[in-house]
Amino acid sequence: MEPLVAAALAAGVRDERVLDALRAIPRAAFVPEHLVDLADVDEPLPIPHGQVTTQPSLVAKMVEALALEGSERVLEVGTGHGWQTAILGRLADRVYSVERYDDLARTARESLVRFGVQDVEVVVGDGSEGLPEHAPFDAVLVSAAFPSVPAPLAEQLADGGRLVQPIGRGGSEDVTLFQRKGGELVARRAVTGARFVPLVGRHGYPPER
């Protein structure tokens, strides 16, 4: 069995579509060249600007919580090098991903094109603002931590839509599944504990100076 599929199963992931996506999209295609030998290890990997990629089994748990069926429009906050983006692209109809750093966005775009991922758009910008021009979204996945869900992300979620975000100050969070019902964002369940970088932006933490 593929190591990352085994890690996802060990973490409790059971959605066959998510497991199939892990089988189909090699993480090695989306990590820095000098770290390719570590691509199948279930650990975060460093990328520029003091960021890290999300641990693969955690990616699987967060994506599974969105319960994607294939017709959804998805917003991802925090592209990184694009592996999670590619997985979302396989599971949903259309994915918009916002990355704060231009060089990371460029690297992700190149990897997504090289691997033939379609119906995915990577945008450089403030992820805490969302992408109102493409809203509403059926699902939102936030790959950075903040004590609450930024208001624009909640507002851009379609009624009945699901949002997954690490809730906390950065360093020790509860990844939480929310759902929008009747104009309100309701916490449904804790997905897992985790450690994420802080969410930086107008509706997150201010940039370090």
Image: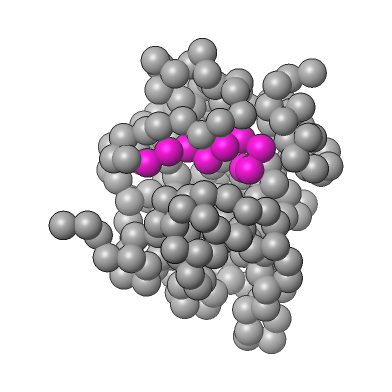
Return the x and y of residue 189 as percentages of the image width and height: 73, 66
Q: Is residue 23 above or below residue 163?
A: above
Q: Is residue 7 above or below residue 159?
A: above
Residue drawn where x is 72% and y is 30% of the image? 7
27 or 13, nearer to the observer: 13
Q: Does the stretch in magenta take in 52?
A: yes
Q: Quadrant of residue 52?
A: top left
Residue drawn where x is 46% and y is 30% of the image? 45
Return the x and y of residue 29 as percentages of the image width and height: 51, 22
Is residue 120 toward the left or the right of residue 108 in the image? right
130 or 207, nearer to the observer: 207
Residue drawn where x is 50% and y is 64% of the image? 168
Return the x and y of residue 35 as percentages of the image width and height: 44, 18
Is residue 66 toward the left or the right of residue 151 in the image? right
Which color scheme did the rendering employ for the protein? one colour
20 or 132, nearer to the observer: 20
Residue drawn where x is 53% and y is 40% of the image? 54
Quadrant where the image shows the N terminus:
top right
Instruction: Give the total of numbered labels.
Output: 0
Q: Is residue 154 above or below residue 8?
A: below
Q: Quadrant of residue 152?
A: bottom left
Return the x and y of residue 80 as percentages of the image width and height: 42, 40
Residue 132 can be seen in this image:
yes
Q: Is residue 159 above or below residue 69?
A: below
Q: Does the stretch in magenta take in 143?
A: no
Quadrant where the image shows the C terminus:
bottom left
Check the image and name the residue furthest to the front.
172
33 or 167, nearer to the observer: 167
Q: State which region is magenta.
A: 51-59
Residue 92 can be seen in this image:
no
